[in-house]
Amino acid sequence: MIYYDTTKMGAARHRSGLMRLTSRLLEELGSAVTAVSWDDHRRTFVLGGKRAPVRFDPADWLLTVEMFSEAERPGLTAFVRNPPCRLAAMFHDAIPLRFPHITWPQSVQRHPEYMKLLAGFDRTWAISEATRRDFAGFWNWQGVTPKAAPEVIALGADFDDGSRVQRDAIVPAQCPSLLGVGIVEPRKNQTFLLDVAQALWDEGLNFELHIVGRVNPHFGKPIAARMLALQKRERRFRFHAAAGDRELGRLYAAARAVVFPTLAEGCGLPLLEALWRGVPCVGSDLDVLRENANAGGCLLAAVNDPADWRAKLRSVVEDAEVSRRLQTEAMSRPLPRWKDTAQTLLQALR
C-alpha cells in the first residue's frame, strides 16, 4: 500500500505552487495511492472523513511532497525516527536557508529541521539537480548521513492537463505582449522587471507587460503598490492579482514571451508551463533554470543585469526571426509530463 500525504493540501486557502504540485501529482497517481493527513491529536496519519488512524504495515510506503516540522505537526519527529512503514519524499528547495531575508519567517524557522528529517527517509527525490546539490551540501555541513542517496525527478510541464500547444510559429502584427507569472515577492524580482520595462519604454520600444500573481503578505505589498501606481500612468502595463484560469489562458495565448527574472527556484515550473503552451521564456541565468532551458525555447539573461535583460527582451519583441525560432523550439522540444513523474514514483515504491 502507498499512502499519500495531503495534510496541507486539504487545509490550503490558496493554490500556491506547492499546493498545485501536490494536487496535480495526486491526480496522476490516482487509485494507486490512498490519501492521508496528519492528525495533531492522535499524532499519526489518519484516513479521510472518519479520521481513522492508518494501520500501517512495515511494507507500506508513506509518500509526501509537503514540507513539515514538529511545531506544525506535533509528534512527527518521533514518527519519522521510529516509522511504522517505509518513508518516501520529494523535496523542493533550500531557498529559506539561502535567502532568509526574503523568505516567510515560518519557512526560515522550519527548513533546517525539515531538511534534517528528510535524511531519515528511505527514498528521496529532488525536483532538480541544483536542489539535490543544495540538500547534499546541507547534510554534509550538518554532519548528517542520509539513509539513502537522493535522486532527481522531473516535474511535469502539463499543469492544467490540457493539450500541448504545437503549431506553426506566428508573429502577430499587434503590439507585442510580455507575461510574468508568479507570487509577488522579492524572490520573483518583479521590481527589477519593472525597471527594465520602464527603461525599454523610455528607449521607445513598444510592448505590453502583464504580471499575474497573488501578493505575498509579508514582502509583497510594496511591490504591489508600485505596480498599481504604474498601471495608472502606463497604459501598456497591467497587474492581475487574481486572474482566473480563462484570463490566464488568454494572456498566455497573446504573449510573445514569458519573463521570469527570479532570484532562486527549486525547479522553475513557470518556464516549463510556458513552453507547454508554446510560449518562449526569457529567464534568469541560474543553474536550476538551465536544466530545463538548454533544450530550447528560452533565452537566459544574467541575474539582475539590466543591460543583458534589455537586450534579451528587445530581441524577442523586435526581431521576428528570433521570436519564430524560439517558438519553434518551444513547440518541438521534448517536455516532461506529470504522468511520467507519477510513474517514476510508482515504479520505485511498488
Image (tube, grey):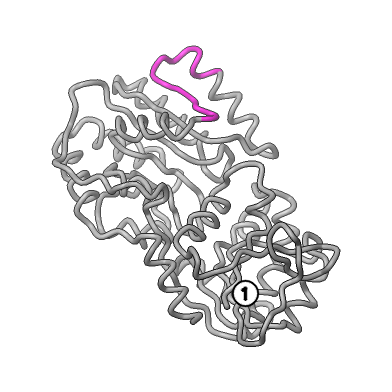
Q: How many marks?
A: 1
Q: Tell me: 304 left or right of 139.
A: left
Image quadrant occupied by the N terminus: bottom right
Q: Residue at x 39, y 58 (%)?
A: 156
Percent coordinates x, y for residue 100 in the rendering: 67, 54
Range of residues picked out in magenta: 229-242
Taking depth in this image into account, of 65 and 258 the one nearest to the observer is: 65
The kind of residue tagged 1 is: Leu
Q: Is 212 above or below relative to 129?
A: above
Q: Tell me: 34 left or right of 276.
A: right
Q: Residue at x 82, y 69 (%)?
A: 43
Percent coordinates x, y for residue 27 in the rendering: 48, 57
Q: Tell me: 4 left or right of 268.
A: right
Q: Is residue 302 visible?
A: no
Residue at the limit of the structure toward the top, as seen here: 233
Taking depth in this image into account, of 221 and 34 the one nearest to the observer is: 34
Secondary structure of the residue carrying tag 1 is: strand
Q: Is 232 in the magenta?
A: yes
Q: Is residue 79 visible?
A: yes
Percent coordinates x, y for residue 200 in the rendering: 35, 26
Q: Residue at x 25, y 31 (%)?
A: 317
Residue placed under numbered mark 1 in the picture: 62
Residue at the limit of the structure toward the right, as seen here: 41
Percent coordinates x, y for residue 322 in the rendering: 18, 41
